[in-house]
Image (spheres, grey):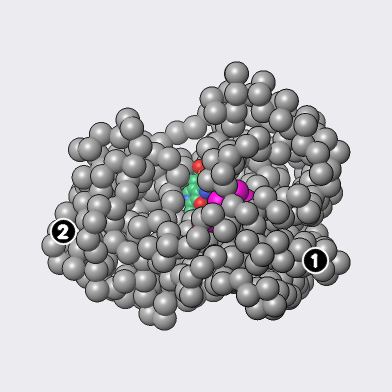
Amino acid sequence: MKHSTSEELYEKALDVIVGGVNSPSRSYKAVSGGAPVFMAKADGAYFWDVDGNRYIDYLAAYGPIITGHAHSHITAAITTAAQNGTLYGTPTELEVRFASMLREAIPSMEKIRFVNSGTEGVMTTIRVARAYTKRDKIIKFAGCYHGHSDLVLVAAGSGPSTLGIPDSAGVPSSIASEVITVPFNDIKSFRAALERWGQEIAAVLVEPIVGNFGIVQPEANFLQQVNELTHSAGALVIYDEVISAFRFKYGGAQNLLGVEPDMTVLGKIIGGGLPIGAYGGRKEIMEQVAPLGPAYQAGTMAGNPASISAGIACLEVLQEKDTYAYLDQLGQKLEQGINELAQKHDIHICLNRLCGALTVYFGVDQVTNYEEAERSDGEAFATFFKGMLMHGINLAPSKYEAWFLTIKHTEQDVRETLEAVDKVFQGMSRR
Ligand code: PMP
């Protein structure tokens, strides 16, 4: 498989776009470098690159593309929106309809605001929680990613619960020190953090089902205990469902798991492939937001008819019967096939899966928190990633990301994928 046009484009891109990419995760830095593949067209479960190679896509644009690329119902909705004007700067009926659909699916979002990205949603939710509680600090979990606003770009220090240190240049340490980081699935450390800082905590921010160090589910009762402890400290629970909402069922992870947060952030899937974010929660909390309350948030592009139309169309597709059963069935086939091939070739992996999302970790027995994910073998993953790419399978170029199935993937695609895994594992077992 040749990638010469991608390589030429990458050279040009490096000259004009910083690092050649518009989001660092798109570079192949984490998988031993080289030119990332430049895609030219996407349809259903497939990508075609600028050199004419075809790939089965499991990146799904890092989550949003659950209906497959260029789904006809969504494309039609976007076309109609474009014909009617893409941006009004006034309220529209579409926004009301979409907000109602979201509230029906995720009832804890009693009142909703649309924004343009997950980053914006999280950033604003924290502001609103701070306004409501009149406190400043937040607790987050190590390895959970919540966008690139200052407050959540912090890393854990050493120790089970630590004040944050900036994870990016340009984030003031005074801001990072407002964030306390504890390990996911570790209620003891969480309790200890609340005992120490409880009265200063505005909110606890968590991905209820983690997508950012692979797919990691909360242990039994973990989220229930997070709720109880947080509320008894007078703080709010925020679920970042940017990846998880509508990924595992029609609704949020909160509906799947039967625990409700005070506030929720959405993004990715709810935009049907166009830029979007949304946040919402209990009425009296959300009424802190301008123009009703003192917490300010605004947006020229927020609720634009194109994104909202794509979002409505996407949810309409997902409402069809058997969507999630189908994703689960395909996911199960992939999981079983990959595990069997790992055994056949004596490759040490651990596979985490929920419905149509999975992560293959190399060289570890289990992953329940970030530390375990970090310990997985990045070199083995890089070899696997590059091998799969050369066999026409497009994965995310990082050992921390998930494979996302779409409703357009077929059993034949899964078979083709497993044939590629077989060949790549065979090469790896000879190393
Ligand atoms: N929260 C989570 C859980 C995410 O996975 C992401 C993006 N990967 C974000 C927030 C940020 O969303 P966006 O990239 O749309 O700003």
From the viewer's perspective, tell me whether residue 65 is left or right of residue 150. right
From the viewer's perspective, tell me whether residue 313 is left or right of residue 277. right
Image point (65%, 47%), residue name = 61
Q: Position of residue 423 (x, y in %)?
A: 76, 63
Nearer the viewer's eye, disc 2 or disc 1? 1
Q: Which residue is mark 1?
A: 419
From the viewer's perspective, tell me whether residue 383 is left or right of residue 366. right
Q: Position of residue 35 (x, y in %)?
A: 65, 35
Per the image, label 2 sits on a secondary structure element best described as helix
Image point (28%, 56%), residue name = 181
Q: Which one is nearer the viewer's eye here, 410 or 324?
A: 410
Q: Quadrant of the N terminus?
A: top right
Q: Quadrant of the C terminus?
A: bottom right
Image point (31%, 75%), residue name = 225
Q: Which mark is residue 277?
A: none
Q: Residues within 10 Å of mark 1 (few under 14, many from 20)?
A: some
Kind of residue at badge 1: Glu
Q: Main secondary structure of the magenta part?
A: loop
Magenta span: 396-400
Per the image, label 1 sits on a secondary structure element best described as helix
Q: Position of residue 179 (x, y in %)?
A: 26, 49
Report the Cα–Cα distance between label 2 and label 1: 52 Å
Q: Which residue is mark 2?
A: 197
Look at the image and tell me whether residue 96 can be seen. Answer: no
Q: Which one is nearer the viewer's eye here, 88 or 190?
A: 190
Q: Point out the tag, 2 or 1, that comes first from the N-terminus.
A: 2
Look at the image and tell me whether residue 174 can be seen. Answer: yes
399 drawn magenta: yes
